[in-house]
C-alpha cells in the first residue's frame, strides 16, 4: 500500500515522455480529408489542432471525432434511399459525399466528441495528478505535456499510462497482486451480434457514447470486440467502403487471425485475474478494454483503461481492507463501469 502511494507521488509526468517525441499538428484550416491522410500517414489516432493566427492550440481531433462525420454520412445515405425508394451505391455515394465535405475544416469537428479539450499538464506534476485527468470523473483520453515555458514536449494518452504502470509493476508488487473481484461490479455491456455490419456497430458506439463494444455470438457468448480505433483500418485509398462488410470480415481485413480465433480465443478476463494480469493483457494485446466474462463466456462488464486508472489512482481496491478514505467514498458513490465517453485509444 505504502509502496503504491510512494510510486504515484515520486513518479513525475516527464518519466512517461517519449524521448523521440515529435509534435505533429493539424492547422485549424486543414480540411477533414487532409487530416484523414495525415493520421493515416503518421499512423496515429489523434492530432492537436493549431490556430496559426492566434498562435495557440484550440483542441485535439481524434478518430472518434471523425467517426461522427462518417456516421453522419451514413445516415444521410439511408435518408436518400428512403426518399428515392431505391438502394444507393455506397461507393458512388461516398465519392459524392467526400466532395461535399472536402472543404470542411478540422476546426469544425475538433473535439466534437467532447473528450479532448486542450488541457496541458506540467512535466513536473506527480503521476497521480495525471491519472486524475484520465479518471472516470474527468475522463480525458490524451493530454499535452508542457515544459517550464509552456512548450509542448509530449502527448500522453490513457494507454501510455497503462503501459507505464505495467512496466513498473515491480515497484508495487502487493497492489499488482490484487484480484479484480475485489472491486469489480457487473454492469451493462454494450454489445452487438457478429452477423451485423461494421457500420451498425459504429453507429451503436456513437449512440451509446462508448468507444468500444462487445461482439457476441447467437448464444450471447463473447467472440470479439470492436473499438473506435479500428476505424483506422478503413482509412485506405478506398475510404470507408469496407464499413458495409459484416463485422468478422471487416476485422479480418486488418487482423487475419481474428476469424480463426474469434470463438476459441476471444480476448477477455475473469474476476479471478489480478491487476497485473489485466495490465499484461491490455499492453501485450494492444487493446483499450477487456470485457469481463462469466463461467459461460458471456460478458458481464467492461474494464476500460479509464476504469483501471480510476481504480488504481483512487485506491478503491487498495483501501478495501482498511477504513474507508475520502477517495474511496468518492469511488464507491460512482460504481458504474460505463461513463460518457468510455476509454481511450
Image (tube, grey):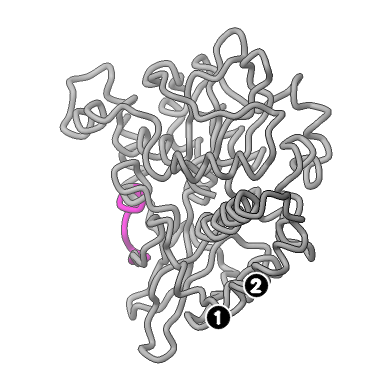
**Residues shaded magenta:** 122-131
Decide if residue 257 is on the left or right side of residue 289: right
Q: Eyeballing the image, is 16 above or below 244?
A: below
Q: Which mark, residue 135?
A: none
Residue at the spot 38% in from the left edge and 53% down from the top edge: 140
Residue at the spot 29% in from the left edge and 43% down from the top edge: 137
Residue at the spot 74% in from the left edge and 41% down from the top edge: 251
Q: Does the magenta stretch include residue 320?
A: no
Q: Eyeballing the image, is 259 above or below 203?
A: above
Label 1 – label 2 distance at C-alpha: 10 Å
Residue sitting nearer the eye, 5 or 33: 33
Mark 2 and mark 1 in contact (Cβ < 8 Å)?
yes
SS category of the residue bearing label 2: helix
Q: How many marks?
A: 2
**Mark 1 residue crowding within 10 angstroms, few (<14) / some (14–19) / many (20+):** some
Residue sitting nearer the eye, 287 or 153: 287
Residue at the spot 59% in from the left edge and 72% down from the top edge: 101
SS category of the residue bearing label 1: loop
Give percent across and percent down for residue 228.
58, 48
Mark 1 or 2, closer to the camera: 1
Q: Which mark, residue 30?
A: 1
Decide if residue 205 is on the left or right side of residue 80: left
Decide if residue 93 is on the left or right side of residue 323: right
Give percent across and percent down for residue 12.
37, 57
Q: In this figure, which residue is indicated by the disc labeled 2?
A: 38
- Image quadrant assignment for residue 31: bottom right
Position of the N terminus, as image quadrant, is top left
Give percent across and percent down for residue 342.
44, 42
Give percent across and percent down for residue 208.
45, 39
Q: Residue furthest top?
A: 295
**Mark 2 residue crowding within 10 angstroms, few (<14) / some (14–19) / many (20+):** some
Amino acid at each position: 500500500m505504502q509502496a503504491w502511494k510512494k510510486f504515484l507521488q515520486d513518479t513525475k509526468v516527464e518519466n512517461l515522455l517519449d524521448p523521440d517525441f515529435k509534435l505533429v499538428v493539424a492547422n485549424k484550416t486543414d480540411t477533414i480529408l487532409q487530416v484523414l491522410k495525415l493520421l493515416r500517414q503518421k499512423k496515429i489516432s489523434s492530432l492537436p489542432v493549431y490556430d496559426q493566427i492566434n498562435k495557440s492550440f484550440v483542441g485535439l481531433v481524434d478518430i472518434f471525432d471523425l467517426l461522427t462525420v462518417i456516421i453522419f454520412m451514413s445516415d444521410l445515405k439511408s435518408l436518400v434511399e428512403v426518399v428515392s425508394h431505391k438502394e444507393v451505391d455506397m461507393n458512388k455515394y461516398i465519392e459524392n459525399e467526400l466532395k461535399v465535405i472536402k472543404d470542411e475544416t478540422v476546426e469544425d469537428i475538433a473535439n466534437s466528441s467532447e473528450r479532448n479539450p486542450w488541457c496541458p499538464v506540467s512535466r513536473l506534476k506527480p503521476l497521480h495528478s495525471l491519472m486524475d485527468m484520465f479518471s472516470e470523473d474527468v475522463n480525458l483520453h490524451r493530454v499535452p505535456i508542457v515544459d517550464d515555458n509552456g512548450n509542448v514536449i509530449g502527448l500522453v494518452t490513457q494507454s501510455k499510462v497503462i503501459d507505464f504502470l505495467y512496466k513498473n509493476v515491480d515497484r508495487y508488487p502487493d497492489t499488482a497482486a490484487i484480484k479484480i473481484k475485489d472491486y469489480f461490479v457487473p454492469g451493462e455491456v454494450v454489445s452487438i451480434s457478429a452477423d451485423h455490419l461494421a457500420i451498425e456497430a459504429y453507429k451503436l458506439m456513437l449512440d451509446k457514447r462508448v468507444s468500444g463494444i462487445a461482439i457476441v455470438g447467437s448464444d450471447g457468448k463473447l467472440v470479439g470486440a470492436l473499438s473506435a480505433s479500428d476505424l483506422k483500418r478503413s482509412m485506405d485509398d478506398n475510404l470507408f467502403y469496407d464499413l458495409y462488410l459484416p463485422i468478422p470480415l471487416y476485422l479480418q481485413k486488418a487482423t487475419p487471425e481474428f476469424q480463426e480465433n474469434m470463438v476459441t480465443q476471444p480476448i477477455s478476463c475473469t474476476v479471478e485475474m489480478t491487476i497485473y494480469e489485466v495490465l499484461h493483457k491490455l499492453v501485450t494485446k494492444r487493446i483499450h478494454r477487456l470485457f469481463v466474462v462469466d463461467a459461460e463466456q458471456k460478458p458481464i462488464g467492461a474494464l476500460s483503461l479509464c476504469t483501471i486508472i480510476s481504480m488504481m489512482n483512487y485506491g478503491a481496491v487498495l483501501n478495501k481492507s482498511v477504513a474507508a478514505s475520502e477517495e474511496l467514498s468518492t469511488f464507491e458513490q460512482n460504481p458504474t463501469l460505463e461513463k460518457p465517453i468510455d476509454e481511450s485509444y
